[in-house]
Image (cartoon, grey):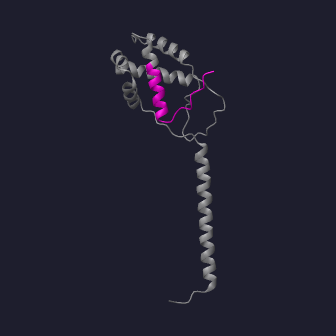
Amino acid sequence: MPDVEPITWVFLAAATVCTFVIAAVVIGREAHRLDAVAPRSVYMIDEVVEFVAEYLPADTQARLTPNELEQLLTFHMRWLHAKGLQPTNVVDRRQDIDDLVIVGEDDLTAYLLVEADRAGIDILDDVDVVHVVDAHLAYFEAIGAVGPKAIDL
């Protein structure tokens, strides 16, 4: 094995240290950027309908068809969008919601009952809508798309 000059070892050590520093800076920067970006929650309507249908009590399941359930979930998503809770551009968006937004179940239930009536969905018991909302919110929680519930005052 040929003799290696001491300066070669110095350059090799410097190159190793520089490589480590560059890698640490890049990884740290990306970790910081990803920490500031909202996590991606994928909402697939077929999956949601199945989840919500399984979550509903048996009597509510018997009174709502899958099509009616899908329409109620769509109305719920439209209501969330109207309240600013479903922004249109969310891919790699920074978490910039500064305002506290509280979703009142009474307002939402009333909205869904009105929209169901307009769409010709026959809601036999108003509690079915409440169960659908609870199940939908449970789905949001399962995929990590909602924050904590507000404390009742």
> Which residue is nearer to you in this view: 49 or 86?
49
Q: In percent of the image, x 46 and y 17: which residue is there?
A: 130
Where 16 sits versus 88, above or below?
Answer: below
Q: Does the segment drawn in magenta span residue 134?
A: yes
Quarter holding the C terminus is top right
Looking at this view, name the residue that lies furthest to the left. Answer: 62
Looking at this view, name the residue that lies furthest to the bottom. Answer: 2
Task: Give residue 71's position: percent from left, percent from top.
Answer: 42, 20
Q: Does the segment drawn in magenta span residue 100?
A: no
Task: Give residue 88's position: percent from left, percent from top.
Answer: 55, 31
Q: Quadrant of residue 45?
A: top left
Q: Left or right of 22: which side holds 112?
A: left
Q: Left or right of 20: which side holds 119?
A: left
> Which residue is nearer to you in this view: 58 or 146?
58
**Residue span colored magenta:** 131-153
Q: Quadrant of residue 148?
A: top right
Number of marks in picture: 0
Task: Give residue 84's position: percent from left, percent from top.
Answer: 59, 26
Looking at this view, name the residue that lies furthest to the right. Answer: 98
Where 73 sits versus 32, above or below?
Answer: above
Q: In percent of the image, x 51 and y 14: which residue is there?
A: 111
Q: Left or right of 95: which side holds 144?
A: left
Q: In percent of the image, x 50 and y 15: which residue is there?
A: 109
Where 134 sits versus 12, above or below?
Answer: above
> Which residue is nearer to you in this view: 62 or 24?
62
Where 138 sits versus 128, above or below?
Answer: below
Task: Give residue 60's position: percent from left, percent from top.
Answer: 37, 17
Q: Quadrant of residue 58?
A: top left
> Which residue is nearer to you in this view: 57 or 102?
57
